[in-house]
């Protein structure tokens, strides 16, 4: 009896399994581990995605900005080249020969109260190219050197819009101490100044005003207002008389040009 009971108990109690865990149970355990690890790994992945997107946006913005900047520069260069090849011709670029007597020149006090506009009335035909006007500049310089002097004015503007630097912003011209002299190359009693000439004339004035070389209330006058001459020609006066800084003084007017500075007619004609 006792032996039968023991045999029954053994049959009722299942034997422990010695087989390895099934694949399904392994997958369940791995999935459980993945679920437990998901929060931090998801955060890391999302953070990397956001950082990558931000970097791509910044890079794209820089590329677009760089492209637009290059387009602007290209447009500016194209516009510059379409107007003129030189625009501002420094003295060393046109001089190419004997130098004027710079020892006679005086420093120009700033801010400058007057802008004196003149023209060249001895030209049979005004120069209209860099080469021709460079020759004209050298001819004027050589004539001045023969008189132990220097080229007369501070700036010269050719018909094609080139600005030739004469005495520049720092040295007194041969007419008057308190002025910048700008000469339009040509005779404009009957000939119209070109659009490019007038643009460059305004460019010089705007630059002088911006850099504080010119007084805030500077006055533009024509040479015929302070001297018995046709310079700068009726056609030029018809243009500048409507400009903001044009000053009605001298011949035909009650006020004398430079009167507030104690200047006389002689002071406007080289006796400084």
Image (tube, rainbow, N blue to C red):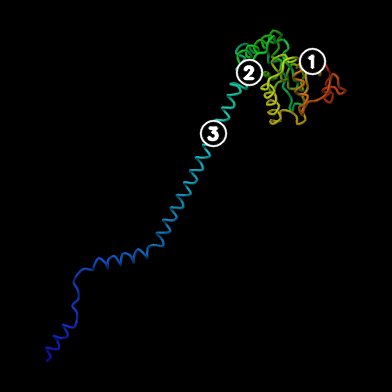
Q: Position of residue 246 (x, y in %)?
A: 78, 26
Are the residues at dot 1 and dot 2 in contact (C-beta closer than 8 Å)? no
Going from N to C along the chain, the mark reached first, 2 or 3, is: 3
Helix, strand, or loop for circle 2?
helix
- Going 39% across and 62% down the picture, which residue do you hit? 38
Q: Which mark is residue 71?
A: 3
Q: Which residue is mark 2?
A: 91
Quadrant of the image containing the N terminus:
bottom left
Image-quadrant location for residue 74:
top right
The label nearer to you, 2 versus 3, is 3
Query: Which of disc 1 and disc 3 is earlier in sequence?
Result: 3
Image position of 151 with respect to 55: above or below: above
Disc 3 on helix, strand or loop? helix
Q: Residues within 10 Å of mark 2 (few under 14, many from 20)?
A: some
**With 232 as the anchor, is 95 left or right in this view?**
left
Measured Cα–Cα span from mark 1 to mark 2: 24 Å
Residue 168: image location, x then y, percent: 68, 21
Residue pointed to by mark 1: 269
């Amino acid at each position: 009896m006792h032996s039968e009971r023991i045999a029954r108990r053994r049959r009722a109690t299942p034997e422990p399994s010695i087989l390895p865990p099934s694949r399904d149970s392994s997958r369940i355990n791995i999935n459980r581990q993945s679920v437990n690890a998901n929060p931090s790994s998801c955060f890391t992945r999302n953070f990397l995605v956001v950082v990558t997107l931000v970097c791509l946006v910044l890079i794209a913005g820089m590329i677009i900005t760089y492209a637009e900047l290059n387009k602007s520069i290209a447009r500016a260069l194209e516009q510059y080249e379409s107007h003129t090849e030189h625009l501002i011709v420094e003295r060393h670029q046109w001089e190419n020969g004997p130098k004027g007597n710079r020892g006679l020149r005086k420093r120009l006090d700033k801010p400058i109260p007057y802008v004196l506009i003149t023209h060249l009335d001895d030209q049979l035909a005004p120069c209209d190219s860099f080469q021709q006007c460079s020759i004209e500049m050298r001819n004027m310089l050589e004539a001045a050197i023969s008189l132990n002097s220097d080229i007369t004015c501070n700036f010269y503007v050719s018909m094609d819009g080139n600005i030739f630097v004469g005495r520049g912003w720092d040295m007194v011209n041969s007419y008057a101490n308190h002025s910048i002299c700008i000469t339009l190359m040509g005779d404009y009693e009957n000939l119209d100044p070109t659009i490019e000439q007038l643009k460059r004339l305004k460019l010089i004035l705007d630059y002088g005003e911006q850099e504080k070389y010119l007084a805030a209330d500077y006055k533009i006058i024509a040479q015929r207002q302070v001297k018995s001459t046709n310079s700068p020609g009726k056609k030029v006066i018809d243009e500048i008389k409507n400009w903001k800084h044009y000053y009605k003084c001298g011949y035909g007017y009650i006020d004398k040009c430079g009167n507030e500075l104690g200047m006389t007619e002689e002071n406007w004609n080289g006796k400084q």
